[in-house]
Amino acid sequence: MRAAGSWLLFTVLTMMFALTTALIVNASPANSWVTIITNNTSFGYGYSITSYNGLIYIYYTELTSSGVAVVRGLVFNGTAAVKAPLPVFNDLGEASPLLVELGNGSLMMIWAGVPMGNYSLSNLTILLQASVMRNGSWGPVVNLTTSGDAMSYASDGEYVYLVYEPKLTLTYNNTILEELTPTGVVVRALSIPRVLGITGAWNGLVIVQFINGTYALVNMNTGVVEPIKASIAGFSSGLLYYFYNGTLTVVNGTQRLVISLPIYAYAFPVAWSHGLVIIAWRPGLLSVFNWNGTTLQPIRNYTTAFTIIPRASIIDNTLYLAWFGLVNITNGHGSIYMAIQPLPHPTNQSTTTTTTTTITTTTTTNNLATTTSSVNTSTSASTSTVTTATTTTSSSTSSVTTPTTSSTLTKPTHGATPTWVTAAVVVIVVVVLIVALLMSRRGSR
């Protein structure tokens, strides 16, 4: 239930709404809108979007004039937007927010924070911090970690999954994959070197991307690391998906849906009450489709920058599609946009195929059989699969190679509440944070 005080605040702020960074313009087709969320973000910082209590929340990273990274946010009610509430931050800088709905129905935000102090690469500390929203306001800031460097994180609503280094190396030789409770208690820890980031997590299964661009599915219960041949992979409302060589595969237990998207480099599904919404993109083009159980129906195409990082959420049969677009490849400067697109109501939905796309967990295996074709992906596409750039540079040009092995993996028995965590992927780019980290005191916010 939406809190009365929160709704009143939202109504008042809506009437005063004059955000220059969220200028909404009408776009074709009718009833489709595009808005600029911010023009002051950078390639390497994550952002997150989710629906909660009838509203759409999007939180992102901006840079102050002094170079300090800070978290900002907007709340959408239809096409109207107001500034989102913020936790009481108390650090040198914060970046890469992640939104997740917990099993008890509360909304939690997780981010990377650099505590007050003087830093160099030898003593850099990046903490994982969190706050829970209550009655429309964020609660106290809690440190989920107390030392070391939080590099990447995701959540399935029951646990938080973290890529962590005890001491920053920039080589990723000492990365540890941890499973934490929402209060920061370590449940499990696996030493898995060379992990760059997390691209999805659900029910004890974590999809990681290694520094060479390859993907793997990690079972936190057994420690098994299973390679996945993919240019992008993750979880969407408990559905495992991976995209490779023009084909999107969505796995639900022992059932699988295979959708051909030959002209696209990447794609992911978003669960919807009328089937699946498919978000597909390649350099310069972002497309939205509806899979109604039998056919793939085009909804909308957007012309974008060469390098984009899309995220999406659905509420009341309306798609909120956000994407980061890289503007300046030299300094990583970019913008975040939001498209608000009403979705069609399918009329010829197949009952049999719908079972494939329904969010259920009645089986105990995930078969990750893949094709044997090879493909190289560009930097612009590979960085979008991990939400942000690599930790070495925002303009790296190395290609991505994919593994060739596959097997069958048994799922753990956690009782997690499935949530869409594809948008919750966060990779902290240390090089981008250095300006803020070397400051002796917090800059102007």
Image (cartoon, rainbow, N blue to C red):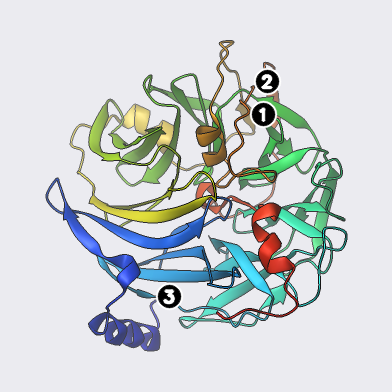
Vertical placement of residue 141 versus 290, above or below? below
Q: Earlier in the sequence, mark 3 or mark 2?
A: 3
Q: Residue 342: x percent and y percent?
A: 22, 51
Vertical placement of residue 397 versus 45, above or below? above
Helix, strand or loop status at disc 2: loop
Image quadrant containing the N terminus: bottom left
- Furthest toward the front, the residue is 330
Amino acid type of disc 3? Ala
Amino acid type of disc 1? Thr
Instruction: Please report the residue visible at 29 percent of the width from the left and 39 percent of the height from the top.
Output: 303
Left or right of residue 69: residue 50 = left
For residue 198, which quarter of the picture? top right
Q: Residue 231: x percent and y percent?
A: 55, 28
Q: Residues within 10 Å of mark 2 (few under 14, many from 20)?
A: some
Q: Residues within 10 Å of mark 3 (few under 14, many from 20)?
A: some
Q: Earlier in the sequence, mark 1 or mark 2?
A: 1
Q: Which mark is residue 214?
A: 1
Q: CA distance from mark 3 to mark 1?
A: 36 Å
Amino acid type of disc 2? Pro
Q: Earlier in the sequence, mark 3 or mark 1?
A: 3
Q: Nearer the viewer, residue 69 or 175?
A: 69
Q: Which residue is mark 3?
A: 84
Helix, strand or loop status at disc 3: loop
For residue 158, which quarter of the picture? bottom right
Say whether marks 3 and 1 touch (CB < 8 Å).
no
Instruction: Please report the residue visible at 29 percent of the width from the left and 42 percent of the height from the top.
Output: 274
Say whether marks 3 and 2 touch (CB < 8 Å).
no
Say whether marks 1 and 2 touch (CB < 8 Å).
yes
Vertical placement of residue 336 versus 439, above or below? above
Q: Which residue is mark 2?
A: 403
Helix, strand or loop status at disc 1: loop
Q: Which mark is residue 22?
A: none
